[in-house]
Image (cartoon, grey):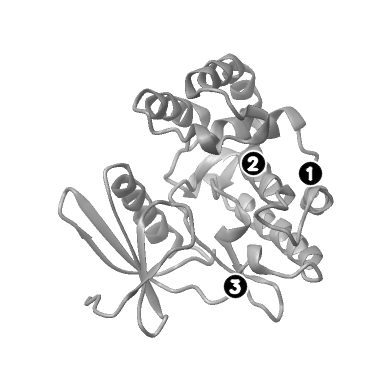
Amino acid sequence: MGSEGWERVRTGRSGADVRRSPDGGAYTKSGSGPLRDDLIEERERLEWLAGTDLPAADVLDWTDDGETATLTLRTVAGVPMSELSPSEAPSAVATLARFLQRLHAVPRDSCPFERWLAVTVPLARVRADQGLVDEDDFDHERAGRSADAALVDLLDRRPRAEELEVSDLVICHGDACLPNFLVDPSTLEVTGMIDVHRLGIADRHLDLALATRSISDTGLNPAYGPEAADALLAAYGLPADPWRLDFYRLLDEFF
């Protein structure tokens, strides 16, 4: 698929080179090294999602020369939840809660991707050892700490988190932040989820932790706020464990 005239997209935080087709109907994501690995994982997950009723982008093309990979996707219709107005935010929060319920209710034995702690904690250690953790982007409660110090904290907490995850393993998006869910601007129903390279079986608190953190951050998402985050948990309908919410935000610092 030719890329002449494709416009570079400068929003987003994945680090990949993202470009939009002239007609807006498709976009490409290219990356090398760890970004290539992310694209491989995203392609695999999108191909699996295509066999479900969960809305996500269609894979149009894939190239990989062993160093750089390029994933071409059909554009998902809709607007990111992060771009909605304050008047739309309450309905959007309820919509996101329903969508997470739907995702988490999919039988987990149908999903081949593992993101439980036996997988993700070792990955966190590798990323810390390789200097891939962005210490400047830590949440405010960990600002100024080193990746090594955060890793010690993570490893100290891991045994308790592994005991607790057993009863709450579901299919998670893995990066359930507001920009990664698109909605119909008229109905505010979810039209698709994007950036799914971390999708897999994990404790439901992973999604709830990152969704509530995203909603609470009025610097990034000014239409929402802490009350909206509380509303998400209430609408989701199951009690959330504050200790696990904090643990999975700590884990996310490494990715």
- Sequence order check, earlier mark of 1 and 3: 3
Question: Relative to residue 241, is residue 37 depicted above or below?
Answer: below
Q: Nearer the viewer, residue 106 or 216?
A: 216
Q: Nearer the viewer, mark 3 or mark 2?
A: 3
Neighbor class of circle 1 (other Cα within 10 Å; few <14, some 14-19, many 20+) is: few
Q: What residue is rendered at 48% in x and 37% in y?
A: 115
Where residue 65 appears, as percent x and y from the top left, is 15, 54
The residue where tag 3 is placed is 79
Q: Is residue 239 left or right of residue 7?
A: right
Where residue 236 appears, as percent x and y from the top left, is 77, 51
Res. 204 mark:
2
- Sequence order check, earlier mark of 3 and 2: 3
Amino acid type indicated by mark 2: Arg
The residue where tag 1 is placed is 238
Dot 1 and dot 2 residues touching (CB under 8 Å): yes
Task: Label 2, secondary structure: give it.
Answer: loop
Neighbor class of circle 2 (other Cα within 10 Å; few <14, some 14-19, many 20+) is: many
